[in-house]
């Protein structure tokens, strides 16, 4: 039975009565208004949406089998109501996002080991390593046992691996796929893990400071130049879409690109380049793409970041589907690490492109998030899953060991 996101809006609304839980610790706290934000808000622009897809065409593809490639798309903080808000803005009605047309739909529970409401580090660790941990911890369990992520296991198996995000590369969600530290704010230590990861593609936003020493306008206090170390290992640094496109396919790449909110297709263009680069490996690839804007929208009670961020994520989904329908060997899974903002959204009949939105908080909530899947291996995601089951399923498809069974010394 397919589970439609619209059926769970009552659950989301009920959650708004819960106490305020911990906010995302990676960013400065946002002062919480005593009164709720008004539902009337004029978006600064009409955010572009990707071209629609034919749900019947997507449903015709097999949902069982073993994928050669896995594309894992994470909309940080992208709860069900944020998706509803973006769909109302872009399409005039809910349920019209590209991701919502994928043939397999479900929900994921997101709680962490020590809190009903997770942060991005704990939820990211669950989504990458298949085990629960405490809020704030990256790539290790509450006892600080480091364990292999699905990305690290894929790399060790001979597959190509890429990490792409509109956040900093040292942000919680991307870092859990390659780093292992007890505190998510340990940006220096996290950046250093990129050198030993040996991943084929590492792309984040323009924040290079954790990679550079202070004398090069960085934030490192140990004097290491991580950019130089990566270059010494054969990596090519890229700072634009054009440079990424021009980089020879055999070369490993890292870089710091801009993904402006007004250009909702920007992240998807870079992701498309990543698909083609990584696909040159006959063994296949694993790629995680994160859009951080929905989370920023929730924390800041900023409807532009909410709508634009969800649509930026949807563009990545559309390009991934284009690639997967052509290849016929690629599993795509789309989800969120958690919901941010305690959002509720409703149509605005006076101005359909500016739906009404209510933020119940500036932190995260514990409501389940949507899961959308396509391609071989996707049938698993019908219904309700725990977020740790997602990477465990990936590992099972590829016969890899992750999580507690793969401790890293």
Image: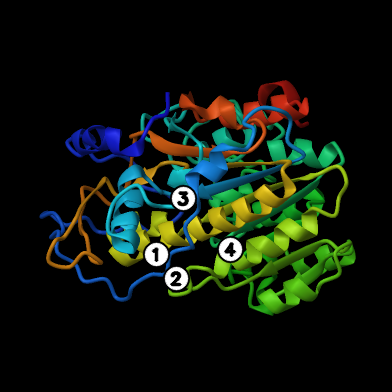
Q: CA distance from mark 1 to mark 4?
A: 13 Å
- Labels 3 and 4: the sequence-earlier one: 3
Kind of element beneath mark 3 = loop
Foreground tag (1 vs 3)? 1
Kind of element beneath mark 1 = helix
- Labels 1 and 4: the sequence-earlier one: 4
The residue that disc 3 covers is: 76
Camera-nearest residue between 186 and 172:
172
Camera-nearest residue between 233 and 274:
274
Camera-nearest residue between 142 and 86:
86
The residue that disc 2 covers is: 261
> Do tag 1 and tag 3 residues touch (Cβ < 8 Å)?
no
The structure residue drawn at horizontal position 23% and vertical position 35%, both measured from the top left corner, is 15
- Labels 2 and 3: the sequence-earlier one: 3
Indicate the colouring scheme.
rainbow
- Labels 1 and 2: the sequence-earlier one: 2
The residue that disc 4 covers is: 268
The structure residue drawn at horizontal position 74% and vertical position 54%, both measured from the top left corner, is 194
> Do tag 1 and tag 2 residues touch (Cβ < 8 Å)?
yes
Residue 183 shows in the view: no
The residue that disc 1 covers is: 308
> Do tag 2 and tag 4 residues touch (Cβ < 8 Å)?
no
Quadrant in the picture for the N terminus: top left
Q: Is residue 380 left or right of residue 255?
A: left
Q: Is residue 256 above or below residue 340?
A: below
Q: Is residue 291 left or right of residue 237?
A: left
- Labels 2 and 4: the sequence-earlier one: 2
Q: Position of residue 347 (x, y in %)?
A: 19, 55
Q: CA distance from mark 2 to mark 4?
A: 12 Å
Q: Position of residue 395 (x, y in %)?
A: 71, 29
> Do tag 3 and tag 4 residues touch (Cβ < 8 Å)?
no
- Labels 1 and 3: the sequence-earlier one: 3
């Amino acid at each position: 039975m397919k589970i439609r996101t619209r059926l769970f809006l009552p659950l989301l609304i009920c959650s708004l009565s819960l106490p305020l839980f911990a906010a995302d610790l990676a960013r400065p706290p946002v002062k919480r208004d005593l009164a709720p934000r008004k539902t009337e808000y004029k978006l600064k622009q009409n955010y572009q949406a990707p071209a629609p897809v034919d749900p019947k065409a997507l449903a015709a593809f097999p949902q069982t089998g073993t994928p050669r490639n896995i594309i894992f798309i994470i909309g940080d903080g992208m709860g069900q109501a944020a998706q509803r808000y973006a769909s109302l803005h872009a399409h005039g009605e809910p349920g019209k996002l590209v991701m919502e047309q994928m043939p397999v739909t479900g929900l994921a529970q997101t709680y962490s080991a020590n809190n009903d409401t997770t942060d991005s580090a704990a939820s990211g660790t669950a989504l990458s390593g298949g085990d629960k941990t405490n809020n704030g911890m990256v790539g290790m369990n509450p006892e600080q046992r480091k364990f292999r992520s699905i990305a690290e296991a894929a790399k060790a198996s001979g597959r190509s691996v890429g990490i792409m995000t509109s956040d900093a590369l040292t942000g919680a969600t991307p870092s859990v796929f390659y780093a292992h530290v007890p505190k998510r704010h340990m940006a220096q230590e996290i950046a250093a893990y990129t050198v030993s990861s040996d991943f084929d593609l590492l792309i984040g936003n323009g924040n290079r400071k954790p990679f550079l020493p202070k004398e090069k306008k960085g934030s490192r206090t140990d004097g290491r130049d991580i950019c130089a170390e990566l270059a010494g290992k054969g990596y090519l640094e890229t700072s634009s879409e054009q440079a990424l496109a021009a980089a020879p396919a055999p070369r490993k790449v890292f870089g710091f690109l801009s993904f402006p909110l007004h250009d909702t297709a920007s992240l998807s263009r870079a992701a498309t380049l990543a698909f083609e680069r990584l696909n040159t490996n006959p063994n296949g690839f694993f790629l995680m793409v994160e859009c951080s804007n929905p989370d920023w929208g929730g924390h800041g009670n900023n409807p532009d970041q909410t709508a634009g961020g969800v649509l930026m994520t949807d563009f990545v989904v559309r390009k991934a589907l284009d690639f997967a329908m052509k290849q016929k060997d690629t599993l795509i899974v789309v989800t969120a690490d958690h919901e941010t903002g305690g959002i509720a959204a409703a149509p605005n009949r006076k101005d359909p492109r500016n739906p009404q939105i209510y933020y119940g908080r500036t932190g995260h909530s514990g409501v389940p998030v949507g899961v959308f899947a396509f391609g071989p291996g996707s049938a698993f995601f019908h219904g309700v899953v725990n977020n740790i089951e997602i990477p465990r399923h990936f590992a099972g498809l590829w016969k890899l060991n992750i999580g507690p069974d793969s401790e890293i010394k």
